[in-house]
Image: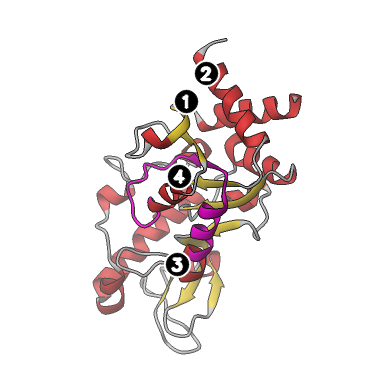
Amino acid sequence: MNSLDKRLKKAAELIRGSKWLCAFTGAGISTESGIPDFRSPGGIWDRYRIVTYQEFISNHEARVGYWKMKHELFENLKHAKPNKAHLALAELERMGILKCLVTQNIDGLHQDAGNSPEIVVEIHGTNRKAICIDCNRTWPIEEIHSILEQVGYEPKCDHCGGFIKPATVSFGQAMPEKEMGRAIEAAHRSDVFLMIGSSLQVEPAASIPRLAYNSGANLIFINRTETPYDHMATVLFRESASEVMEGIINLIKKQ
């Protein structure tokens, strides 16, 4: 049995035997769905400067630039489909094993894969909706993108006149209290914590696996690159998330 087989077997044993499994996902789980790494050279974040929440509120040019970036991002995201790693997490929920799924992602692919909205905690918000920052009215994101050129990339609420932005957490914007509370509670409750596709560089999200570890959970990490907390992991994978999750699910079904 090679190293990968041994790690897959160990991970499957931990997950199958868990009483309260929490999964935590980052951008790396969605790259295999064709969603590019926007931080890479030539990516969207290399061509558009980051606009903070404070700038969005106070500066017309910043709002226009922000929405142009989001419009290009929307074109990249709208045809993306869940991959085998997403589908495996949905399967774990159907098996009654996965209790909570905390995600940094805004793409909605976990719900598309079949995970119930009740267990998915989107700590960075969602790109599927837009929201008025004054009155909190919401719209499907497609509706707002369809009018961007008409309104000069500065959509405003037709109810109160407030600025509209995607329902995602921007730089400088407070994290959603309810979602962060649920994520922290899940970390404390978990006896096995499965992290997929996060560099664990961004706080406060990076603190969630640490909380699980400090509460006694066994950590399983699946990530292409090193993280600052790899030493905490009981099982560590650098392989493809789809390959690893498919292998784990197959082993669980056999036993």
**Labels 4 & 3 near each other (Cβ < 8 A):** no
Q: Nearer the viewer, mark 1 or mark 3?
A: 1
**Labels 4 & 1 near each other (Cβ < 8 A):** no
Q: Which residue is disc 3 drawn over?
A: 166
Q: Which residue is disc 2 drawn over?
A: 4
Q: Nearer the viewer, mark 2 or mark 1?
A: 2
Q: Nearer the viewer, mark 4 or mark 3?
A: 4
Report, in whole angstroms, how far the alpha carbon at label 2 lies from the one at label 3.
40 Å
x, y (%) of residue 164? 43, 76
Pick whichever, 236 or 144, lies toward us. Answer: 236
Pick whichever, 15 or 73, lies toward us. Answer: 15
Q: Which residue is disc 4 drawn over?
A: 213
Q: Amino acid at mark 4?
A: Tyr
Q: Secondary structure at mark 2?
A: helix
Q: Amino acid at mark 1?
A: Glu
| Residue extent of the magenta highlight | 181-206
Report, in whole angstroms, how far the alpha carbon at label 1 lies from the one at label 3.
33 Å
